[in-house]
Every structure is written in C-alpha cells, then in structure tokens.
Image (cartoon, helix red, strand yellow):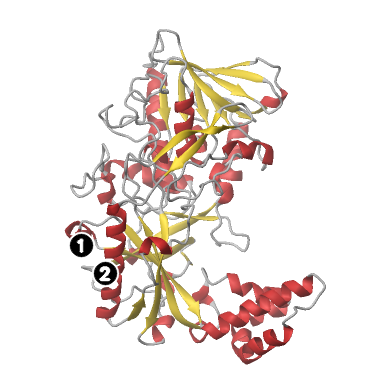
Amino acid sequence: MIVDALELADGTLIESDVCIVGAGPAGITLARELLGESFRVCLLESVGLDFEPQTEALKRLSNVGGDLEPPTAATRRQFGGAANAWDVLTTEAGGGVRYLPLSAVDFEKRDWLPHSGWPFTKAEIDPFYERAQRVCDIGPYTYRVEDWTEPDARPWPLDEARLTTSVEQYGHHRVFTRDHLEELRRSPNLNLVLHANVTSIEQRPGSAAVERIAVACVNGCRHSVTASLFVLATGGIENARLLLLSTAQQPNGLGNQHDLVGRFFMDHHNVDCGELVPASPELLERSALYDLRRVNGAWVMAKLNIAEALMREERLLNGAARIEARLDPGLEKALRSLARAARAVRRGRLPDDIAAKVREVVPQLPRLAAIGGAAFKEHGVMALARQENRGRYGWSKRSGQWRSFASFSVELQTELAPDPANRVVLGDDRDAFGRPLAGVYWKWGETDRRSLRRVQELLVTAFADSGLGVLRLPAGEATSNVTSPAGIFHHMGTTRMHADPARGVVDADCRVHGVENLFVAGSSVFPTGGYANPTLTIVALSIRLADQIKALMRSRRIDIA
C-alpha cells in the first residue's frame, strides 16, 4: 500500500515491525525480499514517485574544500533513488547502468593497501550476486569473456600476464523506478510512505536500541515511526549524515563512538588515458567486443583489466580501461558543425559562420551518409546531427564504421584508496528543516597517484608490445585528466564494515556496532570500493541482509529492552 505522509494528520505515529529508510536500489531490494512475510514492513521515501525540486534541494552539500566538486548531480531524492539518474544508452532514451561484481582481490586484506579487507570473501557473497542478477533483470551470473564472445567479437591479442579482457552487463533503471513499484504497491504487509523526510534516529532512554525515527514533511507536519528493527538505506552521504545528526544520547552521533561515521569516503574517477592509434585500420573492424552489444538477450561490453598477479606484484589499485572508437578528426569536426547549424535552424536563424560550416561539412558528405543515411531518411537532419553525441556506444554497428573511425579513446575507471581523512561531515549551512547539511572532503592520496601513473605506463607498453598500436597519453599529471571532477557518484565507505568496533561502523551483518536493532544497507558499508560500479554489490548485500532480517524476525531475536 502507498501512503502519502503529506496527507496524514500532524503527529501521526506509524507503527511497523521493520522500518527501511530510503527507496533507492538498496531499500527497494530489501523491501521486495521481505514481501509476503508475517511481519509489517514500512519503506520511507523523502519524495514522491516523481521528481520534486523542493525536496531535491534538501540534498545540497556544504563546501568544505578538497579535490572533489560537490557530488550531488547524480544522487536523487525520488522513488528509485539514483536509478532515476542512470544514463547509459542501452535505448534511445538512455536509462542504462553497468552491472558487475567486485573482484575477489577487492575483498582481501592487501598488505600494500592500509584499511583494506572485508570480513568475508567474495565466495561467500557469490550466491547473493547470482540472486541479484535476477533482481536487476540482467543476464546469467558470469562475467568471463569466453561466455560472451561471438565470431565477430573476440578479445584483442594481448599479453594476459599484463592485461586481461572481461565483460560487464547492463540493465535499465525501470527495474527500480517502475517494475518493482507494482510489487510493493500490491503487498499486504508493506506500506510505502512517501514525502517522509527522516530528521533523526531516536534511542530508547537508558537503552542502546533505537525506539523510533522522527519524520518531517515539507508542509510542516511532523510524524514518527516505531519498529522492532530499522535499516538506513539512504546512500553513501545521507546514511552518515543521519547517524551524525542523531545526537540525543550520543553527542558525537549514533554509532560514532570511535569517530568513524563519515570517514573513509570513496568514489570512483574516470581518467582520460589518451588516444590509441591502431597499427592497422583493421583493428577497428575486429573490436566489437569492446562496444555495447546485445548477446543472448543481455547487454554486455568488454573492458581491459590489470592482471591480478601484476596488480599484486606492482602493488597497484584495481582498475579497468574502456575502449571507444573515435571518429576521424575531419568527420568529427563536420558532425559538430552540422549539429550546431541544425540547432540554430531550429531556433529560426542561420549560424553567423554558415560559410565556414559548409566548408567543413561538404568534404565529409560521403562519410556522413555512410554513418547516418538511414537516420537521415527517417528523421531528417537532426538525427544525423545527433551522431555527434552517439560515439560512446554502438559504434561497431554503424554502416561502414571502420572507415569513419581513426583511433580509440582509452578511459580508466580506477579504485581509490580508503583514507580516514576523506570524509562526510556536517557543514555550517542548513536545510529547510534546520538540520546541518552534509559536506564531503576528499583529496587525491599518494597511493592513488602512484597507482594511476603506473597503470598508464603499463597500458602504453602492453599496447606497443602486442603490436596493436601506440597509446598517446594526454599531457599533464594523470589526476589532471579526470573526466568527472565531481566523481561518478559511487559514494562508498562512510559507515564501513569491520568486525572490530574500533575499525568499523557496522559489523559483518551490517548491524551498527553497539546498537542492537539498527542496520545499514548500501555502498556506505563497503570497506574498499574496487573499480566496479557498486550497484550489483549493493543489491547482493541487500538480499543477504534481508535473509538475516527474516531469520531475526521469525525468531524475534531483537532485544529492544
């Protein structure tokens, strides 16, 4: 059932058995796994089913310095959470997201990486990854390249002692923004409460257990929710912020007895590693494996990984390089001119430099026809102009594609080291409810810089020694060539997992140390982040947590006295 908190009488008490805060992929997965149980579940979302600017403003961040621009653009207060901002072009309208598990090495305690190590191995979470594939509506749980090759899509001949090829799968946001909503709406044991902004977590007087959470609405009403068990699933920034704001009995914030809440903030960065110029144009014809393709009903794309043995030997952070065909410079310039001219015409005028644009476009007309003829015939000049922005995916399927491209862009998605100095804090600015806004402080560390430089060197030598071509690195320090100054919105680590309360906020079961009935879901519990997009791991951990919650609720082994 769906309940709108804006329509409840002021001071309403919402009673439940399990209360989940946040309806993004983590919270939705958790709630979905609890459907049909004998206990009541309450799923709180701060907005409604659609985008609402008034509530979106509550996620603003204070400026607290560091090397990271305020990372808010791809977080979203709305049912479905960050899924509403996914934008990979698996369809014309976008909406896609990458899925892949963390590597086995990501779970290990690495002697060259301080603060690394999860309290369990990848083998222990593999069964939950397999279940997560079904929740995300993607292909089978295999990411080995040999399971996704085709006659016209095979790995490049590289020295596998240095670079290996693997794949990542892609899914669509509608799984979380639409499909699972219908299941939640129909469930008799679940209430989805919209427009419910959680402002604090309140403990029972004289007890370490949580008794209730306070809820505020933009119309001025205040409510509260009681439950036997609570789960925070509001993302890597807001999970920490809510704990830091809950100071009624713990002045430094709930679960923060060792000053760890908010620390170890991590994200991923995409780094431009330059241009790979093929030794032979034929390489462009046999590189479809590294483009987004549909294979046996699943969307997949390959990337290049640093070999695990080399990673250990060189004491490197994890990372993967994606390859994208780049248009011939003359053709790229002509497409840009065509797009700008078409946009000007749609506004009812001709560009001021129309003669120059004609001179750029005319020599490229045969190639323009080859890559966009069908689109032009069906939809006109704007369809052809849009090719300017479509190079990132689908390039291998274009008619005569290898004659249109001249080289490859190489972009590295890199792991970043966990560092307690990188953190989420409470800033001086306040939101509409008078609460301090979060601020994020993050800086490049020497481990990050050294690893990134060395990986670039390895890519240069690996391509050259294989005879594939020459990788021309961009000028300047590697960290100056980040293509995502605000990060890529994979916020991790701020309520990190560790068996020792002095080294982690939650234990191996994602339970907040020292609080019997409070759990955390999502990537904020990651001790390390690897390079992989975190969503599949978020979903897998949510399924694992749901199994634990079901066992606890069935036996009622929750002490809230």
Q: Nearer the viewer, mark 1 or mark 2?
A: 2
Q: Nearer the viewer, residue 35 or 106?
A: 106
Q: Secondary structure at mark 2?
A: helix
Tag 1 near tag 2, CB within 8 Å = yes
Can you tell which quarter of the image residue 453 is in? bottom left
Q: Which residue corresponds to the image point at 47% horizontal and 62% vertical from the top-left? A: 483
- In depth, the one of 143 and 430 nearer the eye is 430
Which part of the image, by quadrant, shows the C terminus?
A: top left
Q: Is residue 86 visible?
A: yes
Looking at the figure, which quarter contains the N terminus? Answer: top right
Judged left or right of residue 103, residue 59 is: right
SS at mark 1?
A: helix
* Residue 191 appears anywhere in the view: no
**Picture disc at residue 310:** 1
Q: Is residue 331 above or below residue 443?
A: below
Image: 402 above or below 510: below
What amino acid is found at the position of numbered circle 2 in the picture? Leu
Residue on which the image places disc 2: 458
The residue under the point 47% across, 41% down is 64
Q: Residue at x 48, y 77 (%)?
A: 326
Q: Position of residue 34 (x, y in %)?
A: 48, 30
Separation of residues labelled 1 and 2 (CA atoms): 10 Å
Which label number is shown at residue 245? none
Q: Residue 161: where, in percent of width, then height?
A: 20, 68
- 288 relative to 22 in the view: left or right: left
**What amino acid is labelled 1 in the image?**
Leu
Q: Residues within 10 Å of mark 2 (few under 14, many from 20)?
A: some
Q: Position of residue 136 (x, y in %)?
A: 48, 48
Question: Which residue is rendered at x = 26% and y = 30% of the image?
Answer: 499
Comes first in the chain, label 1 or label 2: 1
Image coords of residue 380 (percent x, y): 73, 77
